[in-house]
Structures are given as structure tokens and as C-alpha cells.
Amino acid sequence: MCRILLIDTNISSLPIYNYLVKNNEVYVVGAKYDDYLAKIAKNYINIDYSEIDQLKALIKSLDIEYIVPGCNDLSYQISAELNSELQFFGLDTVEVTSILNNKEKFRVFAKRLGVPVPNLISETEIESVIPNIIKPVDSYSGRGVTIIHGPDKRIIDAAIKKAKEYSRSNSCIVEEYVEGQLYSHSAFIHEGAISTDFIVAEYGTANPFVVDTSYIVNDFPIEALNNIREWIVLMIKELNLVDGLVHTQFIKNRDKVWFIEITRRCPGDLYSLLIEKSTGFKYSETYTRPFLNQKTIKSEISLEKLNVLRHTISLPNERVFSSLKYKFPVQIELYFPLTITGTKIQASPFGRIGLLFLISDSKSEFQNLINNTLKRELYEIY
């Protein structure tokens, strides 16, 4: 039995925890007592894992053999820093992690390789290159992001201030605003090549910068997919990435593609279950095995794919949550409530009511389900 430290307490890491705890002594670390894993884990330790010296002391005192990052960038970044001194498995170097997690560094790196990304805009160009978008270099979930539609210095200054406030390094970038459909490409790599990958369509209904609705795309154009794969492999080889997950978000508009984000940690909001329920592929296990120094086993993908829609129930504006009423019958596969009646729910991305997984037996019904969800006509919130 191995002694493992999972660095995350959010509910998104539940499938990772469930895989780990089967045959191991698993410790979970995080600062939030109210997080799901903090409540249910046998060995929860209340430490802010950004306090790396405390984490090192904990690892040594517990004789931890393996560490596993959870479902946020800071968790992976801290894991990479721990790895640089204590030497664990399945983790990139601190330098590589910084290139991937920092939006400005990633765009500079991608441009050098010829990988398509939005163009960075200098401070002197902000008012002349319109529209543009201002965002923190190292934040997530749409926090601190503003689209600039006109050359108004007051609005621009306020957007820069806001972006820096949400940045751990007090830094922001300005880049061209590109429009199109947002997708994610989730790929598992082995010895510099992609072994398995998935394309997921992603939408923000409560907040345009926050994904709350997604589903697997089985008919993504093969030429575009092959181009994406080639760019991913190019980055894998240039950075000498270790085996494991490479998860990217990109925007596609006709024949143009722009990479927006790239991470090596498991995506949040139970993305892993979307893949597993849709295809049968053991996403959480495949993500976790490299950190345990285990070879990836062949994980079957169902020949008969299921129509699964993942939806985060959230709000465009703050309000007290009382109840939820569906406007028509739905087939719920899974539901994870994240709040209770009487709670004041903050606007997305700061508040969530629940994580919902819906299934449909036919493609036409599934498309209707998608359409109603995207129009926010699936349910009413009281």
C-alpha cells in the first residue's frame, strides 16, 4: 500500500481520489474546510498548499511516496516545484510549467514555433487595436477578463487594474480578440506522441468567459483535428513533456484556429466524468497513473457512444437560490449539488448551484437538449 498526497480538495478531484483510495493510503491537502474532499476524505489535512515549505514538511513527516496534482493550475505548479527538490513522477519541470501556465509566456513560445495563438498587443497599441481582450496572465475561469470595444482610456485602465487584481503575479496581457467556437482538446501522450484524444465543444451561458456547458464532438473535421495534433506534438517535443495529459482550449472560426490555454492538470467541473460517461474511457485513471510511476494501460472507448451533456448550473447575476424547475422532462445521469436552499449565489464564475450530467437516447433529442441549455431555457431558478 502506497502513501499518496492528492493536492486538491475540490469536488472535481473526486474521480481521481476514488481511483487512488482503492489500494492506497491517500492524504488530501487544501485550505478550504467546506470543499467536498475535505469533508469526505479519511485523511484530510488543512494546509494552504501554496505554502510550499509547510507542504514539504508534511510530505517528509508522512513519508509520502507519490504526489498527484488535482484540477487547478496552482495544484500542478506547486507539484512541479515539489518535484524539483523531492523528485516525484509524472511532472514537468518548473520552467516548462511556467511556460504553459503563464498566458504571456505561452503565447511567446507558441509564436516562436508557428503555433497559432492570438496576437499580443503592447500598451502603446491598446487604443488602436480594437477590439482587444485584457486578462490576467495566470488566472482561470474567466476571472478578471474584459473585452475592450472602444478606445476609452478609463475603461482600459479599469480593465488592466481588474486583471492584475485577479493575477497571482499582479500581471496581465492584452491580446487581439478572436471570435469563433470554443473547444477543448484533451490528449494523453506517450513517448512524445498522442495515444488517445477527445474534442469537446464548450459554451458559456451564464458568463461568456466561463465554460458551463459541454459535450463530446464525434464529427470534428479531420483535417483540422490533424493540424491540432501536429501542433500539440510539436510543443510536446520542443518542451520535452513527460507522459500524461495535455489539455488545451482553442477557438475555431471556419478554417482558422487559435490556441487559448494549455495545461497538464485534470480539467475542472468533473470534465473527467464527461469523457468517461460519453465513451467508457477511463480518463481519471489514465490521468493519474503517470504520477504513480505506472504505465498507462489500454482503456477501451465504447463503440456505441452515449449522448452526454455536462452543465454547470450557475447564474449571470447574484441572487438567493430557492429551487430549480425543469421546463420539460430530462434524463439525469448524475447530479452533484453544490449549494442548499436559502444560499445567496454569486454570479458566475464565483458561485455554482450544481454539476449536471444529462443523457439523451437520440441525436435529435440531444440537439434539442443542447439548444435549450444554450438558450438557458432548460430550467427556471427561483
Image: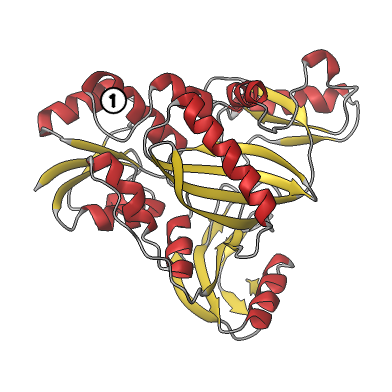
Label 1 element class: helix
Query: What is the crowding at mark 1: few (fewer than 14 residues within 10 Å), some, or many (at least 20)?
Result: some
> Residue 77: x, y in percent?
40, 29
Answer yes or no: is residue 347 visible.
Answer: no
> Residue 110: x, y in percent?
63, 27
Residue at the disc numbered 1: 83
- From the viewer's perspective, is residue 228 above or below residue 161? below
Q: Residue furthest left?
A: 1
User: Which residue sits at x=29%, y=49%?
Assistant: 38
In this picture, residue 99 sits left or right of residue 40 = right
Q: Nearer the viewer, residue 33 or 132?
A: 132
Number of numbered markers? 1
Q: Nearer the viewer, residue 244 or 82?
A: 244
In this picture, residue 343 sits left or right of residue 328 = left
**Quarter holding residue 166:** top right
Answer yes or no: is residue 4 visible.
Answer: yes
